Amino acid sequence: MNRPIPVTKNDYIDVVFEDLTHDGAGVAKVEGYPLFVPNGLPGEKAKIKVIKTGKGYGFGRLIELYEKSPYRVDIASSERHKYGGTQLEHISYEGQLKYKENQVRQVLTRIGKLEDVIVHPILGMDHPWHYRNKAQVPVGEKDGKLIAGFFKPRSHEIVDTNESLIQLPEINEAVQIVKEIASELGISAYHEESHKGVLRHIMARFGQQTGELMVVIITRTADLPQKDKLVEEIVARLPKVKSIVHNVNSKRTNVILGEKTKVLWGNEVIYDYIGDVKFAISALSFYQVNPVQTKVLYEKALEYADLSGEEKVIDAYCGIGTISLFLAQKARKVFGVEVVPEAIEDAKRNAALNGIENAEFAAGEAEVVIPKWYKEGNAADVLVVDPPRKGCDEALLQTIIEMKPKKVVYVSCNPATLARDLRILEDGGYKTVEVQPVDMFPQTTHVECVSQIVLREN
């Protein structure tokens, strides 16, 4: 028998927040019924308004705080906090780290049923602001001028902003200057409703270690008005620019980049380093947006792999070879697999760039290629996985269980799917030894983990 919902829409009630959801909303309970309230923090007492109810949970809006959390900090812009991707900006960095570490511990216990796994204190940043090395900013028009910023949630209304507190200063500067130049030159913004206009997005990428900047102009039309003047002004006003690229996306779509890309000025790529490994980054390359913490994450993965120089390693979901090239420095041979063919071409180019000859890369789905390798007798001593948010495909997990590599290193961007997959590996004869959370994206709800998993001895 279903219990009646103890609150109704538009009720005003007093609550105490107990927890945070995975997207940073406060959780309060009324007679066991959870209410999710943005901007509420654990331990705070507040008045809320119920704005929506469903069978299992409801939503509320914060009306008044009676008691504040010691981790609450005042923020200057509620607009930016609501729409700019910094969902945890109102929590001190100490509080953010505590929340993320607790989230990892909770899902490992609740979803993975892993009671005895060592979860280390999360590795945070010394400077948890201005760390992102890439931005893709939508462009619109208001009062006859171009605007660029971020979309309000569940809408396509652009909020104009001059600065993101999580983008590198060079990225913020590049976006603003390109917007100003395009506006001065009378280049029109793309309009979704009419599918008219020119400029869709401004993209900027920056190599933190090399100081090299790339600007990508994304348009609906193959023709770029005032192209020569636009390039001339970008070069004059952005001294660090090494590459200006034009990408054409003529489709009615939410996908940002189109299929046609042309270099307008400078080089096809810029370069950056993660540790001692050099990477070539094109307009279309996948490259980690926080190289400082990526180095921390990959060094931990390398530590957990514990390579002696004799091992054969398979790197599933290898991308442009970032982890593979780290592993290749200590392994006998590394095989990387990735579903995106362009990423595999980047991986091969990056291996050559670093003079690494003991890494091979194949394009295809990890859950198809790795079982095929295994049937051909190509088994791994160590297997590294770094899947997307949905976690590992079940066919890949079953192949790991059959292949029986001595060690598995699991790099995860989603603690919930990590916990699910660890449970499958545990049931298949593996033991999760330890998990290291890493804060790759301060001020946001995301948390990465790297886990050391070993084959149980019979």
Image (tube, rainbow, N blue to C red):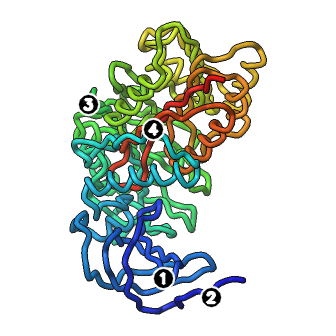
Q: CA distance from mark 4 to mark 3?
A: 34 Å
Residue at 47% from the left image edge and 92% from the top image edge: 10
Label disc, if present, on residue 211 of the rendered structure: 3
Q: Which residue does the numbered mark 2 point to in the structure image?
A: 4
Q: Is residue 15 above or below residue 68?
A: below
Label disc, if present, on residue 435 of the rendered structure: 4
Q: CA distance from mark 2 to mark 1?
A: 12 Å
The spot of residue 8 in percent (x, y) is 53, 91
> Mark 4 vs mark 2: which is more N-terminal?
2
> Mark 2 vs mark 1: which is more N-terminal?
2
Q: Secondary structure at mark 1?
A: strand
Of residues 235 and 275, the one nearer the viewer is: 275
Q: Secondary structure at mark 2?
A: loop
> Mark 4 vs mark 3: which is more N-terminal?
3
Residue at 49% from the left image edge and 78% from the top image edge: 59
User: Which image quarter: residue 312?
Assistant: top right
> Mark 2 vs mark 3: which is more N-terminal?
2
Residue at 32% from the left image edge and 71% from the top image edge: 43
Is 303 left or right of 370, judged from the image as shown? left
Q: Is residue 70 above or below residue 32?
A: above
Q: Secondary structure at mark 3?
A: loop
Task: Please state which amino acid type lies under the numbered disc 4.
Answer: Val
> Mark 1 vs mark 4: which is more N-terminal?
1
Instruction: Decide: few, some or many residues near mark 4? Use Cα within 10 Å; few <14, some 14-19, many ≥20.
Output: many
> Mark 3 vs mark 1: which is more N-terminal?
1
Q: CA distance from mark 2 to mark 3?
A: 60 Å
In the rendered view of the protein, which quadrant contains the C terminus?
Answer: top right
- Whether residue 361 is visible here, answered yes or no, is yes
Q: How many marks?
A: 4
Q: Which residue does the numbered mark 1 point to in the structure image?
A: 30
